[in-house]
Image (cartoon, helix red, strand yellow):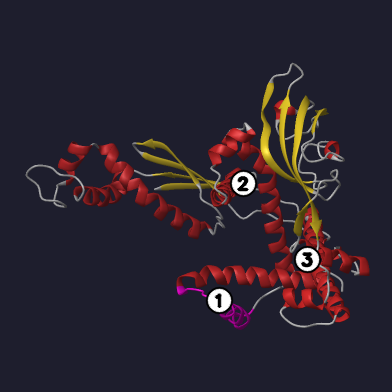
Amino acid sequence: METNVKKLPKAEVEITVTFSEDEFKRDMEEAAKVLSKEVKIDGFRSGKIPYDVLVEHVGKDMVLNHALDTAIPRILTDIIKKEKLQVISRPRVDILSKDPVNLKVVAPVYPEIKVDGYEKVKVKPKEVEVKEKDVDEALKNVQKQFIKWKQVLRGVKEGDKVEIDFEGKDEGGAPLEGTQSKNHPLIIGEKMMVPGFEDALIGMKTGEEKDFPLTFPKDYHKKSFQNKKVHFHVKINKVEEPELPEIDEAFIEKISGKKTPIDEFRKNVKADLKEYKQSEEKKNAEQQLLEKFLKVTKTDFSDLLINEEVEYMIQQMKQDMQAKGLSFDQYLQYTKKTEEEIREEMKKEAIKRLTLRFGLNEIMEKEKIEISDKEVDKKIKQIPDLKPEQEHEARGRVVNSMRLEQLFDRFIQK
């Protein structure tokens, strides 16, 4: 067997392997034994078909392909160990010839990574402050969860809930698909309709009808409506005004389950808001740090590795859509894009993810950030309902999370 290993640009190696027929004979015979259990030939028992008879029956190519399926992983493993190659992703295998067997393998290897100047990177979180108006806003949001609606006969005001019939037509008077609805609920001021639509309803009363034109935004999500002038006819069926519950001790007891003086309740809300804001600012500081680390990371990746990351992103996207009851094909129809176009768009984000992943690992190595088994075991025990078969994967996630937390502690100023 002749082998040759050559370094390629973009963190790849090329491995060529050439066998003589005698060298590959053992793999062919092993493959024939497997096939002989699957093929039926009159006069021979399963698994006992002679090699020459089997080859004549199914063809040498079929035996050869089965032999390659088992031989290629074994050969590559041996070469990778011998050459001490850090292969980090699935290689691409090309069969250049079958007689003699000649393979060319391109494999992504661990890239060279530079993080010059990373040690100078620092981030300082902003001081958070909670004002009384923030508490007022939080309480108002709580009130809205218990809102009641009371029908009124006056003109529509902002904050009212209305039920309307509406229809849109083009400038020639023809109805436009997707611009009609009956008894459509709408809260004025929430900006759920085309800009200007809700404003046109202000002052209208129950039973009143109105015609008005609107020009759709140039960046409207549906291209056929971008910059399009539409004439709407609207009828008000119902107008309701909001009734918010008063924030008193009875209301506080209702939502918290215990009697609390209003002043004390406001203090508790203020403390919760501060904790929430601090948590958000911590996340913001961590994101800033990651972006700065990304800027100082210089490396290059194999296209095979990038495509593998894109594939992972596509599968995640499909799973997320499926959970929401939307198929990937429906998404493609809606966006008017092909899967290949989506993949091409994802490459930039895939490169960013890979660069950050390898950059962070390099920085952690330089910083000598290590997590002991004892620390990991402690965290693992805190994971609820963890099954034994899930523990290996969970350990990996825990180690990565704890290393990252240590890195944040070192580079985010207190």
Q: Residue beneath label 2, please?
A: 306
Label 3's element? helix
Q: Earlier in the sequence, mark 2 or mark 3?
A: 3
Residue 259, above or below 52 = below
Mark nearer the viewer, 2 or 3: 3
- Whether residue 84 is in magenta: the answer is no
Residue 224, above or below 387 = above
Label 2's element? helix
Q: Is residue 343 visible?
A: yes
Residue type at numbered disc 1: Pro
Neighbours of disc 2 within 10 Å: few (<14), some (14-19), many (20+): many
Q: Nearer the viewer, residue 377 or 144?
A: 144
Q: Nearer the viewer, residue 208 or 373?
A: 208
Q: Position of residue 391 (x, y in %)?
A: 51, 72
Dot label at residue 142: 3
Residue type at numbered disc 3: Val
Quadrant of the image occupied by residue 397: bottom right
In-image side of 122 versus 92 (left or right): right
Label 1's element? loop
Residue type at numbered disc 2: Ile
Residue drawn at point x = 69 percent, y = 47 percent? 349
Mark nearer the viewer, 2 or 1: 1
Q: Residue beneath label 1, please?
A: 384
* Residues under numbered marks 3 and 1 in contact, where contact means CB atoms less than 8 Å apart: no
Q: Position of residue 113 (x, y in %)?
A: 71, 56
Which residues fall within the magenta stretch?
372-388
Q: Nearer the viewer, residue 195 or 303?
A: 195
